[in-house]
Image (tube, helix red, strand yellow):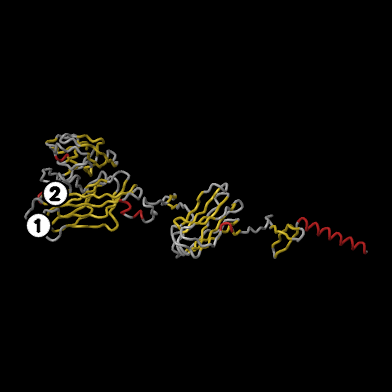
Amino acid sequence: MKEKLIGIFIGIFVVLCFTIGSGMIISEGYEVVKSIIIDKDTGAFAKVNSDGQLHTVLESKADTNNATEVALGANNAWTGTVTELASFNAISLFVETDVASATKGLTVQYSNDGVDWHIGEAYTIPAGAEKFYSPPPWMNYYRIAYTNGASPQSDFHIHTVLHKTMFKPSSHNVDDNISDEDDAELAINVIKAKKPNGSYQSIGSSTDGNLLVHDAENPSAIAFGDVEGKATVQKFGNAPDFDTDDGQITVWDGASDSPDIDVMQYVYSVTADIDSVISSDTGDLQDVEIQGLGASSNLVVQTVTLNGQTRVALATNLYRVFRVKNVGTSNFTGDVSCYVTNAPTSGGIPTDTSLIRAHVQDGNNQTEMAIYTVPADKEVVIHGLYWYSAGANKSSTYVCTLWARPPGGVFQLKWKGAFNDDIQSGLFHPFKTGLYFDEGTDIELRVESIASPAIAGAAISGGFEIEMKDK
């Protein structure tokens, strides 16, 4: 019996020794983990979790090579000692000083060989600062250098800690003031937004760097060209000389008894037959920009050079023209006409003035046409209308109207108002939500003088503001 008990104790001892040598089971609450003996003399062991991962502690290390508390004199410098970074993944750096550093006086320097040094990070430290930075360990070696400003220090601390793992970088309270010298991380974000058709599109920015959220509805941003697919158009006109007997007239340069154009209601082409430009003065040789629509109602902007009273052909025939302007370096000295079908002219003016589709009055360098046709693949909203007596004081009531004609249709009255020249100088009407028109629509301002007895030599200016977008 005695020999049997001795045998049992020996067996338990052997099993225990085997367990200690190869790993033992330790119960910690409900979780069971293994351990491995790492020092057989002391019995110290390291834990291994149920996934076979060794439990380790990665200790940080204070880098005394790059630490100092010795105050610097005016403009003096201090440089730390080279430290290897091979086994570290992060650096934390604390600086305190009672006077300002030199410009970019704090530098974190890096080297691959400990000889050739590069400045990776540089900061200007303000007076009274307690600053914390987390520069990355870019190369094999690093050191800290500091150059003081023009005043001697009485309090100065630099402390550096090296870390085995990445850690949370420098941070600030929500209401802290921040400066260009604070440590920062670069974050590039692409924000996607869902469009009505179900697809997603990246949200962009304006050319000024503003996020395009409300900017897309900002008329100024549209006018500056910051909103893709949108534009603003200002249409203004002047009927320079008309009478009560003329009835309802279009607000454009051709509604003029002097010079004698006398096209009181604008005439629209039915095909792309607008092909010519000419001046009434032989000395007009300027470049002229002509804006209009081509045969398929596409927007066309072209520049031609005048040749005085000699007709110049357009590069592209137009179906509509709604602006002609001088883009040369000298003023027009005559009237400039854009007209159809190479019509006969006399003195630089088409003899049949009803063939004129745009006319620039001498001295204006640009047409005054309260007329517009919405280009193909565009849609527009009119935000406001105005009419004002244009310097010709007449005792009359002016009936002001807005007309629009859809493609293939007839002109429809869209708005009507009136003002009396004895009481008011004009009339302005805003559209709070805008007045919508689709592609191909002709838009025109008109006016009529209602006076008894009839008046002559009236003048009215008018216009409207358009916001246009791609369909």
Type of the residue with mark 2: Pro
Residue 308 drawn at (x, y percent): 16, 36
Which residue is depicted at the point 23% across and 44% down?
323
| Location of the N terminus (image quadrant) | bottom right
| Left or right: 17 in relation to 75 | right
Query: Mark 2 sits on what residue?
Result: 240
Q: Nearer the viewer, residue 418 or 102?
A: 102
- Marks 2, 1: nearer the viewer: 2
User: From this viewpoint, which residue is outermost toward the left?
Assistant: 453
Residue 376, percent across and down?
Answer: 30, 43
State the mark number for residue 395: 1
**From what the image shows, is residue 169 above or below residue 314?**
below
State the mark number for residue 88.
none
Q: CA distance from mark 2 to mark 1?
A: 16 Å
In this rendered view, identify the residue nearer to me: 196 or 388.
Answer: 388
- In the image, residue 277 sits, relative to residue 159, either above or below, namely above
**Quadrant in the picture for residue 342:** top left
Q: Position of residue 42 (x, y in %)?
A: 75, 61
Amino acid type at circle 1 is: Ser
Q: Residues within 10 Å of mark 1 (few under 14, many from 20)?
A: some
| Element at label 2 | strand
In-image side of 48 versus 138 (left or right): right
